[in-house]
Amino acid sequence: MTAMSTRSEASPTRASGGLPSGDFIIDATALTKTYRMGTNEVHALRAVDLKVRAGEMIAVMGASGSGKSTLMNMLGCLDTPDSGSYLLDGVRVEGLSTNELADIRNQKLGFVFQGFNLLARTTAIDNVELPLLYDRTHRWSNPRATAIEALKKVGLGDRLDHVPSELSGGQQQRVAIARALVTSPRLLLADEPTGNLDSRTSVEIMALFQELNDEGITILLVTHEGDISRYAKRFIEMRDGRIIRDEDVDDRHIASVDLLTVDDPELAGTP
Amino acid sequence: MRTLLTMLGIVIGVGAVIIMVAIGQGARSSIEAQINTLGTNMLVITAGASTAGGVSQGAGTFNRLQIEDAAEKLQREATLITAVSPVISTRTQLIGGAGNWRTEINGVSTDYQVIRDWPLASGTFFTQDDQRALRKVVVLGSTVAEALYAGMDPIGERLQLRSVPFTVIGVLAAKGQTATGTDQDDVVLVPYTTARARLSGRSFIAQILASTASPADIPAAQEEMSAIMRESHKLGDADDDFTIRNQNELAEAATGTTEVMTWLLAAIASVSLLVGGIGIMNIMLVSVTERTREIGIRMAIGARGSDVMVQFLVESIVISLAGGLLGILVGIAGSALVGSLTGWSTETSPQAVLMAVGFSGAVGVFFGFYPARKAASLHPIQALRYE
Ligand SMILES: Nc1ncnc2c1ncn2[C@@H]1O[C@H](COP(=O)(O)OP(=O)(O)OP(=O)(O)O)[C@@H](O)[C@H]1O
Ligand SMILES: [Mg+2]
């Protein structure tokens, strides 16, 4: 109960709009996750409530260990909460079998990780095509062409046959983004997508995210950098497994505009 | 590289199975070929009821087998056999030509040559006339001819059999060794009538050989001969005191042991296949551990447990099948090599090859299953976090 009160103090307006849940991509209530290490209990999530509408772009920040990744994993159906309820795009997630969770991840979600997580010794095109091959609805008549399209969209139309070790970090992350969006997911989850990239490349990636968001994909991204969070529309801060702040970003930056200025080497270090 | 080494286990296993079976099959078919040198469509009647092993029983029943009478009765009454000959044999000393030679004397009828399908190298075989007149004529096996009359023509020469003078009228073509290594050419043939009249007094081993026109007649001929023999021996309700065996049965008795040997060798060789399988399981387990992160990635983008499982199963089946195919090549080459090094005849059998392929596929499934299931049951997050 303390978790609830803390959240409502911190974010009195957002995520409790009283609209029917069908309007939310994410409608999570009292998500709780506790890790037990021997006798030690780690409360990674303490009754987190979160509602996200279609088209939002949210930055999640917070100290290390505050539960950001845990939250992303729950929202991404990669892990199941100990308790709480979760509606993803109108589908009730708790109680689904592992196979149903796999299908949801395949059809509704896209993931981008800090470490890129591409398959080594596998070409960009093969990496991007993979989610389409795991699809069980047979909605992709030409996976190859769809994958090429996705790679073109992230600006890698000329790197189709490169394996990850032949690509720069930024390019690898673009391949990962192409892989995440190739299935036209409703929701893109990115856990520190720019954590391994330099400043300029980070802004480039954010420009890509903003472009995708403009096209209607809902994006939730975890970041440690305040500058990166300014490219989002909404900002959430976590501490000790709770959401302690939830507000709109008022000085939202447009990454494509910033790119013009970070070309200046003086500014490159501090995007 | 590591995969290649793993495959080596299967390669050796499959190769060994194929080589072993090839050696066994080779031995078997060379025995069969030798059995066929006995004659064609041949039936053999021996004294004594048959036992499980096909060995004749005691000599007591032997005395009741009036071998020549039975042979003559068969000659008169049996319709399905085209040739019949008694064989009464003993061992004795020959004197003539270069000196002495101890050999086997077979008293046979004129049909014997037909039954054994045994051509002459020179001279003639004895005739019905010789047989009726109890002429003292002899046909030599090639070994005997070689021993006593090396470098000369023995036809018309005289030799002594148990102090009885005989005239050589023919020499048989060489037939070679039997399956058990006896020299079939170390023999002399005389008319059975002459043998009975002139060479009696020693213990004779007797049998009747007969042959049919075609292999299809053999079962019926066997029945018919049995009936005639029973009548001739006045057996009434008593059990047979003779045994009739056909050539297939003779061949089976001889090849039975090699069959057992073949499968025993194959079984031993399969152990190495098993060891190869364990090698595959080992590398698959290592591979699952090494690729835990990859499994996590695949799961994150929507692979079901079954997708991951299939992926690893296919991988292990591919490894073992590839090993199996290589093993077949090794096996075939190895069989040929063993054959040319040892002079044994080897015969790669298609069944052994098929079995090896099937077996290596099964090894892949069986030993890949546990690692694949382990991979499939990984938790996506734990797999993704794995360092
Ligand atoms: N599998 C696990 N087993 C035990 N404890 C875990 C596990 N995963 C996370 N935790 C704990 O849960 C808490 C929240 O972890 P989480 O990874 O969500 O933090 P985070 O906010 O993503 O941190 P960072 O910014 O460093 O990535 C931490 O205290 C962590 O130690
Ligand atoms: Mg984290």
Image (cartoon, grey):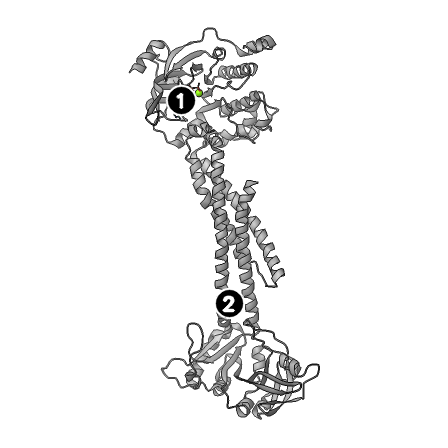
Q: Gap in Å between the C-alphas at discs 1 and 2?
A: 72 Å
Specify the label residue A70 is tagged with.
1
Q: Is residue A97 above or below residue B246?
A: above
Inspect the image, locate mark 2, and give the three-letter code of the amino acid beneath it: Thr
Furthest-left residue in view? Answer: A1
Q: Secondary structure at mark 2?
A: helix
Inspect the image, locate mark 1, and give the three-letter code of the amino acid beneath it: Thr
In the rendered image, residue A195, in percent from the top left (x then y), is placed at 50, 18
In the rendered image, residue B172, in percent from the top left (x then y), is placed at 63, 80
Q: Is residue B314 left or right of residue B335?
A: left
Q: Is residue A90 visible?
A: no
Specify the label residue B255 is tagged with.
2
In the rendered image, residue A119, in percent from the top left (x then y), is placed at 53, 30
Residue at image x 48%, y 40%? B284
Give the quarter of the figure containing the N terminus of chain B: top right
In the image, is the residue at mark 1 within 8 Å of ligand 1 by its beta carbon? yes
Q: Is residue A185 above or below residue B322?
A: above
Taking the image in four quarters, ligand 2 sits in the one at top left
The numbered mark 1 sits on a residue in which chain? A
Q: Is residue B170 left or right of residue A39?
A: right
Q: In front: A149, or B121?
A: B121
